[in-house]
Image (spheres, helix red, strand yellow):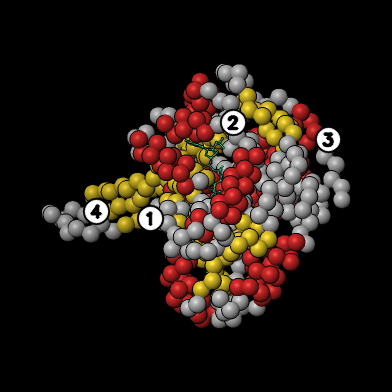
Amino acid sequence: MSDIALLPQVEAFLGRHHALFIDGRYVESQGSQTLDVINPATGRVIAQVSDATGGDIDAAVESSRRGFKQWSQAAPAVRGLVLLKLADLLERHREELAQIETCQSGKIIQISRAFEVDQAAHFLRYYAGWATKINGETITPSLPSFAGERYTAFTLREPVGVVVGIVPWNFSTMIAIWKLASALVTGCSIIIKPSEFTPLTILRVAELAIEAGLPAGALNVLTGGGQVGKGLIEHPGTNKVSFTGSVPTGIAVGRAAMGAGLTRATLELGGKNSAGFLRDIDTEVAVNGIIEAGFLHSGQICAAAERFFVHRSQIEPIMDSLAQRLGKLNIGSPLDERTEFGPVTHRQHQQKLGEFFVRARAQNNTIIHGGKLMEGPGCYVEPTIIFANRRDDALLNEETFGPIATFFPYDSEEELLDLMNDTPYGLSASLWTNDLGKALRMVPAIEAGTVWVNMHTLLDPAVPFGGSKSSGIGREFGSAFIDDYTELKSVMIRY
Ligand code: NDP
């Protein structure tokens, strides 16, 4: 087992002094506070970033207002072209970006390459295609004429203004790309606030965006803690927040946005997603599905399943077979191309997962596999299978955001649906069966923004994504994002 060598440009980037990215260039923070960026695989500090101050927020917002003025006037074809060029640049710098991402997040290098770069480029190109297709409509007014006059009407789709994009640490580049692509293609400018745990890759992407032809101020990046996001939302110069993160922070963000003069808000939040396996499913298919649904990127995926419902007659063989598979996973350094399972992204998260294990033992749940933090300087957590005692058990109801699959048996399909929906959250769910007719009849009864059948977690830019119930407000992707990033202006004419 050995790590790939870091590219010289990655070493150089990590060794740099990282300032804030405002107005198309690096600008020193007005304060002196910095935040350490720690490689979770080694526990070592790999860089420091600025913790933006109130003055930095003002400077970024001023720049973004100027950027908005200019960018909103760019022809739609030009906007599309810049996004296409940025996609090309991401691919040209694929290995560099993937390595920076792996060093800051502990994501295994194959996932950094495939999702943070390749998928991000796919999303950019998809959004670029919308640039020339965002239109209002013509409307025939409905009321009768008073004295022979006539009326006609049409709508305009206008960019909402300066967007604040607040991004979590699990997919720091891809999620930032979803937000900046939605904003830029509709003619908005955007300020990205990355998570303090993973602020580096997006700084490099911002440089590439300028190289792609984006005018200064259309994209700014402010690093820092949660208070930077709050300050941006509450700033009178920002018009919308697009937030991805946890449910409690999302609720605070929603409140702050409404309190700041009804700043528009889309909230993509977490949840506790279910996967239901119908009785006809083969054990091997189920086990592959559970690994896909629950263990990719050590379970740190908002749409990942954490509650697994299996027919009582099959639950033991499926859990046993899963335990055998997890036991063979190659756990190791995320920079080793043979590693299949890496660390979680930061120490606090590792400790939070450790507390779930303590609670599982205290509640007499059966730990079928794993259930421990791994020793050493890295933030490793064993891939874990838990059999819950009761349906109101914490492990079955609270988001862990880690590699913990909790199982519960069901007896009838009616009970399966009841269990799957018995959560305040509704981001995603999956059904696994060979009986497509049955699946299609069950899908409408499942309370989730996305329901997958015989798959889990794959997001496609053409397919809307977002949460129902407490998992959020609004949808990304498809054409659905256009409503959230534009205001609809109605124009009525008498003649
Ligand atoms: P958090 O909610 O803790 O943080 C998300 C972002 O919000 C970070 O950039 C954070 O900054 C910032 N933030 C923190 N406090 C505030 C505040 N008061 N006002 C404004 N911004 C603030 O989530 P995590 O980063 O821990 O990410 C994990 C969560 O994200 C999980 O619950 C997961 O389910 C969810 N998620 C949802 C997705 C979806 O599409 N629905 C996709 C991916 C993740 P800082 O980190 O610097 O504190």
Spatial CA span between label 3 and label 2: 24 Å
Residues at marks 4 and 2, CA–CA distance in whole angstroms: 51 Å
The residue where tag 2 is placed is: 223
Q: Nearer the viewer, residue 37 or 199?
A: 37
Q: Position of residue 136 (x, y in %)?
A: 40, 52
Say which residue appears at 50% left-offset and 80% top-offset: 438
> Label 3: which residue?
8
* Residue 162: image location, x then y, percent: 47, 35
Marks 3 and 4, Cα distance to the nearest angstrom? 66 Å
Q: Which residue is mark 4?
A: 151
Could you say whether the residue bearing mark 1 is in a helix, strand or loop?
loop
| Kind of residue at badge 1 | Glu
- SS at mark 2? loop
Q: Residue at x 50, y 55 (%)?
A: 394
Report whether residue 460 is seen: no
Q: Amino acid at mark 4?
A: Tyr
- For the point 60% across and 34% down, the residue is 196
Q: Secondary structure at mark 3?
A: helix
Name the residue type under label 2: Thr
Residue in the image at 19% along x and 58% along y: 143
Is residue 337 placed above or below 216 in the rendered structure?
below
